[in-house]
């Protein structure tokens, strides 16, 4: 099929491009230009794209024109301002990108003749935090406590309004947790911070070591998205699904970094005394609906996830050929 991905130059977007190409699909992308050190550049994905354009989803005119030029069968909307810390520093840009940008993507797609499905990817941080220690379900109330989560909850609601429109295609909403894997170089994220610490030999500053998160391997998450897309196309129905790890893999930050240290003995870290941004201490997702509806499951547990991620960064720092290395990871994952 012909896929159009927004945010294809990002971490998840780059892995999705490689996965879709491996599965034999035509892949097109709309995104901001990639960062210099990015998975997109490391894998030389520009040479592999069927087409792409570098544009801001807040520009409706350029977004609509590219969508019409490509005329895709599936749109997967990943483009977003995705950093909690950045949302505090630049709340207007975050809200504009994640709400108006999402509206523009949905509006640009709605008259495409060949369109079968749009998947809007939000986050686990859309849920209204109520202090629970148990997982959140798709039916729970939305409304987070920081500008990022609030903007993504609004984007989620915008996509929900499209579900109820009279249209010829399905609309899905995917809420995923803390996705990790090789090739993530984002700011203020645990795994990229570990990589930067190893390069600079400066200890990682851990903001909230006690925080429990739904850690999930990037390909497990993306595999769920693609199963969701196929289900919506076959059933011609829209839905909302959580994608997170199994219950045993809800771990706190300290346990995750302790596990990483088994692969990098030189890794050092310390608890930061400066916590400028409020973050939820416990956040879990219930993904039973996705497992039951799609016959989907996580192929990697947290330990295998950490091993794969650590080995990817180790190979990268040793100047191995990362496109082949990453392709081998995908081939092995598909074979499981």
Image (tube, helix red, strand yellow):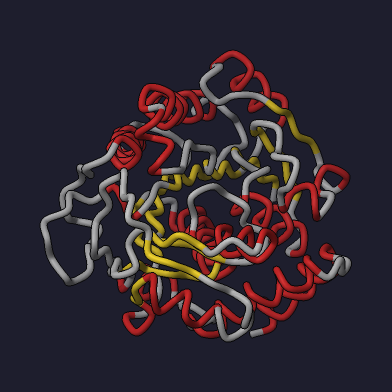
Quadrant in the rendering for residue 295? bottom left
Residue located 68% across and 52% down the image: 14
- Percent of width and height locating residue 48: 85, 48
Q: Quadrant of the C terminus?
A: bottom right
- Percent of width and height locating residue 11: 62, 52
Name the one closer to the observer, 69 or 311.
311
Q: Is residue 40 left or right of residue 7?
A: right
Residue located 57% across and 86% down the image: 262
From the viewer's perspective, is residue 194 above or below residue 81?
below
Q: Taking the image as drawn, is residue 227 in sight?
A: no
- Percent of width and height locating residue 144: 23, 44
Name the one closer to the observer, 268 or 145.
268
From the viewer's perspective, is residue 181 above or below residue 47?
below
Residue located 60% across and 22% down the image: 63
Q: Taking the image as drawn, is residue 179 in sight?
A: yes
Q: Is residue 52 left or right of residue 136?
A: right
Residue located 34% across and 84% down the image: 248
Name the one closer to the observer, 164 or 174.
174
- Residue closest to the far top: 61
- Percent of width and height locating residue 327: 79, 68
Name the one closer to the observer, 138 or 188.
188
From the viewer's perspective, is residue 146 above or below residue 124?
above
Quadrant in the rendering for residue 201? bottom right
Quadrant in the rendering for residue 18? bottom right
Q: Total of numbered circles in the picture?
A: 0
Q: Is residue 234 left or right of residue 91?
A: right
């Amino acid at each position: 099929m012909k896929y159009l991905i927004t945010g294809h130059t990002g971490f998840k977007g780059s892995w999705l491009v490689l996965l879709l190409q491996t599965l034999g699909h035509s892949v097109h992308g709309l995104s901001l230009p990639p960062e210099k050190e990015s998975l997109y550049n490391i894998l030389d994905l520009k040479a592999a794209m069927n087409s792409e354009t570098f544009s801001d989803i807040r520009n409706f005119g350029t977004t609509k024109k590219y969508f019409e030029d490509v005329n895709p069968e599936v749109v997967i909307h990943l483009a977003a301002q995705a950093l909690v810390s950045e949302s505090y520093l630049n709340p207007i840009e975050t809200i504009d990108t994640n709400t108006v940008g999402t509206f523009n993507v949905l509006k640009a797609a709605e008259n495409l003749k060949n369109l079968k499905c749009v998947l809007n990817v939000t986050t686990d941080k859309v849920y209204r935090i109520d202090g629970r220690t148990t997982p959140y379900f798709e039916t729970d109330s939305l409304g987070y406590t920081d500008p990022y989560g609030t903007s993504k909850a609004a984007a989620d609601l915008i996509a929900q309004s499209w579900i109820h429109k009279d249209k010829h295609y399905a609309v899905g909403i995917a809420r995923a947790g803390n996705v990790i894997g090789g090739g993530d170089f984002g700011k203020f994220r645990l795994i990229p911070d570990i990589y930067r610490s190893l390069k600079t030999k400066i200890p990682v500053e851990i903001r909230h070591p006690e925080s429990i998160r739904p850690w999930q391997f990037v390909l497990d998450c993306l595999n769920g998205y693609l199963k969701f897309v196929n289900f919506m196309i076959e059933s011609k129905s829209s839905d909302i699904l959580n994608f997170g790890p199994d219950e045993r893999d809800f771990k706190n930050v300290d346990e995750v970094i302790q596990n990483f240290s088994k692969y990098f003995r030189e890794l050092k870290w310390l608890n930061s005394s400066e916590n400028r941004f409020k973050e939820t201490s416990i956040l879990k997702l219930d993904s039973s609906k996705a497992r039951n509806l799609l016959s989907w499951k996580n192929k990697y547990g947290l330990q295998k996830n950490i091993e794969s991620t650590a080995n990817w960064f180790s190979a990268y720092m040793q100047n191995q050929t990362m496109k082949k290395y990453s392709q081998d990871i995908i081939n092995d994952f598909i074979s499981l």
